[in-house]
Image (spheres, grey):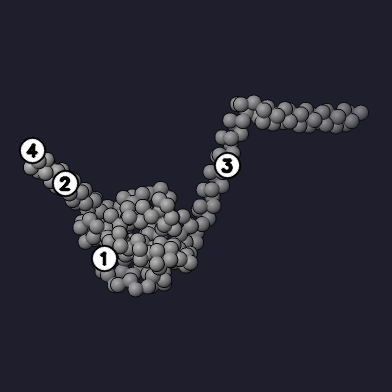
């Protein structure tokens, strides 16, 4: 008799638990508070899954020491300077502006003496030739079929890879670094933090001097008109 009552009590508890779960789910789906909680939980879950997939994808990165010659970039003249290879997507819409932003980096004398910029565009050779006319500060490479991007595991773009002495020495492992952040991380890998900071300071000085020069030129023109 006791065993029967115990089993009945257990069944009743299970039934009550399931009923409470059903009520809770109903409340979550029908009340504003519940919907906000579900949306927040779903967002956290998606973020965790994305982070997991991101770290899984990083496992396919080329190893440090990977030779530049195996990347598949043709007609790249030998250079003693460290090389920063940046893989970009297609140049439709605003993405073309990204190319020109990187090209501006290569126009500064301070940087041009220390690093060579190579941009890999997933575009046809004809399109790359058109862009090259406006992007004078960097070397452009056409990768229409995405073969170079696959070899470098560029599963997000822009993604940067640093080479020195023909070997891979640094890989970008964070998405939202920005151009300056990418440059700093790469230079730190090849020159160390102190020398990198000195270089960044010199670059900042060059930018200020250029800005001041434009301002003075504008003032002089204004004075002449008076």
Give whichever of discs 2 and 3 has the lower sequence position: 3
Q: Residue at x 46, y 55 (%)?
A: 156
Q: Is residue 209 left or right of residue 87?
A: left
> Do tag 2 and tag 4 residues touch (Cβ < 8 Å)?
no
Q: Quadrant location of the C terminus?
A: top left
Judging by the rendered image, the residue that carries numbered circle 2 is 214
Mark 1 vs 2, N-terminal side: 1
Which residue is nearer to you in this view: 128 or 47?
128
Q: What residue is shown with label 3?
A: 45
Q: Position of residue 213 (x, y in %)?
A: 14, 47
Q: Are marks 1 and 2 in contact (CB under 8 Å)?
A: no
Q: Residues within 10 Å of mark 2 (few under 14, many from 20)?
A: few
The residue that appears at 43% across and 55% down in the rendered structure is: 92
Instruction: Examine the rendering and report whether any part of residue 78 can be seen.
Output: yes
Q: Name the residue located 30 percent from the left edge and 59 percent from the top edge.
A: 134
CA gap between label 2 and label 4 equals 19 Å
Residue identifier under label 4: 226
> Seen in the image, is 211 located left or right of residue 139?
left
């Amino acid at each position: 008799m006791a065993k029967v009552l115990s089993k009945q009590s257990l069944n009743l508890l299970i039934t009550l638990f399931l009923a409470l779960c059903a009520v809770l789910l109903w409340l979550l789906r029908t009340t504003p508070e519940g919907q906000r909680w579900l949306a927040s939980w779903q967002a956290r879950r998606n973020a965790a899954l994305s982070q997991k997939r991101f770290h899984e994808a990083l496992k396919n990165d080329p190893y440090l020491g990977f030779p530049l010659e195996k990347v598949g970039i043709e007609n790249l003249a030998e250079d003693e300077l460290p090389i920063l290879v940046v893989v970009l997507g297609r140049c439709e819409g605003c993405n073309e502006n990204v190319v020109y932003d990187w090209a501006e980096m290569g126009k500064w004398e301070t940087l041009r003496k220390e690093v060579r910029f190579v941009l890999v565009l997933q575009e046809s050779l004809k399109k790359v030739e058109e862009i090259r006319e406006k992007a004078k500060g960097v070397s452009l490479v056409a990768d229409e079929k995405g073969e170079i991007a696959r070899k470098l595991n560029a599963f997000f773009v822009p993604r940067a890879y640093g080479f020195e002495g023909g070997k891979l020495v640094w890989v970008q492992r964070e998405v939202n670094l920005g151009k300056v952040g990418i440059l700093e991380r790469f230079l730190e890998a090849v020159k160390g933090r102190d020398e990198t900071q000195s270089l960044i300071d010199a670059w900042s000085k060059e930018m200020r001097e250029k800005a001041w020069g434009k301002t003075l030129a504008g003032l002089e023109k204004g004075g002449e008109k008076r």
